[in-house]
């Protein structure tokens, strides 16, 4: 493919198919990027999806540890000799290798994502303290952002600040959106200190009806809003064209957070999402289509 990554067409098609089959709006959103950057983003997404599925799908902990360890080895191989692409045994790894070479994606960020998945695999997370929650957000979201901004076209310190803040904002929004779903799985991702201050029991079976829950959600939402604002401030110091996808992601999740706040925190079982017209309006507003 002209202007694309120097990888076999069959590998590029296989990675794109993985993203398309995931049924995510990410697929359509990334199609506005130039071919090589789009292919890199598809490979990053596919990697994240694969390691996330390792953790989420049923199976023994040791099997999950082994599968994550195999991915650590694959990531290490991306930064080895120039013949790595001949040894790679799957399409995702081969496309990632080309993306690493072209966009200087960092091993520590790939490994950070795996570390975040391992936190979920090895522990049923129930009310982490603020420091642990921040580390979790950095690994499962901001690390993905640090990979993404390079693929988008900006490897500056300001772009890393965008990833730092936007990753936290997105993940905190996800946590607020998924309180009921997480509780049903025996998990709580809201910070322990704030739950205790509000008198909320650290019990997934009781958290959703606790009188103090809305106060905690309000604090987490305020923190997310601050990260959204800090991400926008950092974007102003970045390459404007490169930040287009990040601006859309930020605007989309900020809109979801606003809808959550309008719904209120006493009905966390009511799922919130954006309509197709809302998504289209955001895409047009931020110049992606």
Image: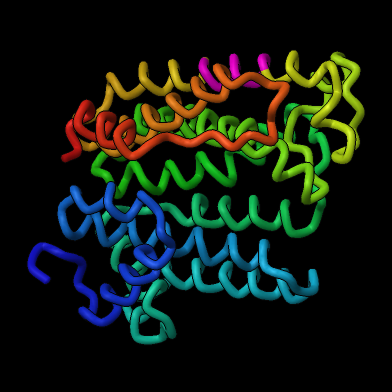
Q: Nearer the viewer, residue 153 or 278?
A: 278
Q: Nearer the viewer, residue 264 or 92?
A: 264
- Looking at the image, residue 40 sits to the left or right of residue 56; the answer is left
Q: Taking 145 as reference, is 99 above or below it?
A: below
- Looking at the image, residue 133 sits to the left or right of residue 245; the answer is right
Q: Taking 204 as reference, is 192 above or below it?
A: above
Q: Quadrant of residue 190?
A: top right
Q: Nearer the viewer, residue 43 or 248?
A: 248
Q: Quadrant of the N terminus?
A: bottom left
The span shown in magenta is 218-225
Q: Is residue 71 magenta?
A: no
Q: How many marks?
A: 0
Q: Position of residue 140 (x, y in %)?
A: 58, 46
- Looking at the image, residue 115 sits to the left or right of residue 165; the answer is right
Residue visible at 34% across and 79% down in the picture: 85
How is the structure coloured here?
rainbow
Q: Position of residue 22 (x, y in %)?
A: 43, 62
Residue visible at 35% across and 32% down in the picture: 159
- What kind of secondary structure does the magenta stretch mostly adopt? helix
Q: Position of residue 176 (x, y in %)?
A: 63, 31
Q: Quadrant of the C terminus?
A: top left
Q: Taking 107 as reference, is 244 above or below it?
A: above
Q: Position of residue 155 (x, y in %)?
A: 31, 40
Residue visible at 21% across and 79% down in the picture: 9
- Looking at the image, residue 58 sits to the left or right of residue 176; the answer is right
Q: Taking 43 as reference, is 237 above or below it?
A: above
């Amino acid at each position: 493919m002209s202007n694309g990554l120097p990888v076999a067409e069959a590998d590029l098609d296989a990675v794109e198919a993985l993203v398309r089959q995931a049924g995510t709006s990410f697929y359509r959103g990334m199609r506005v990027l130039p071919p090589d950057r789009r292919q890199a983003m598809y490979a990053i997404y596919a990697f994240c999806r694969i390691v996330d599925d390792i953790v989420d799908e049923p199976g023994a902990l040791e099997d999950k540890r082994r599968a994550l360890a195999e991915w650590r080895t694959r990531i290490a191989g991306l930064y080895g000799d120039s013949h790595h692409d001949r040894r790679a045994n799957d399409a995702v790894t081969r496309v990632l290798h080309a993306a690493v070479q072209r966009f200087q994606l960092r091993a520590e960020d790939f490994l950070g994502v795996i570390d975040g998945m391992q936190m979920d695999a090895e522990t049923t997370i129930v009310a982490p303290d603020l420091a642990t929650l921040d580390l979790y957000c950095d690994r499962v979201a901001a690390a993905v952002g640090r990979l993404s901004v390079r693929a988008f076209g900006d490897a500056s310190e300001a772009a890393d600040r965008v990833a730092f803040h936007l990753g936290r904002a997105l993940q905190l929004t996800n946590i607020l959106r998924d309180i009921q779903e997480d509780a049903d799985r025996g998990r709580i991702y809201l910070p322990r200190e704030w739950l205790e201050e509000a008198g909320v029991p650290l019990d997934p079976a009781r958290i959703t009806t606790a009188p103090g829950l809305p106060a905690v959600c309000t604090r987490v939402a305020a923190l997310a809003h601050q990260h959204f604002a800090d991400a926008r401030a950092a974007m102003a110091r970045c390459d404007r064209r490169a930040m287009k996808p990040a601006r859309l992601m930020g605007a989309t999740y900020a809109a979801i957070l606003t809808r959550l706040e309008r719904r209120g925190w006493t009905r966390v079982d009511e799922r919130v999402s954006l309509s197709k017209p809302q998504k289209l309006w955001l895409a047009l507003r931020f110049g992606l289509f």
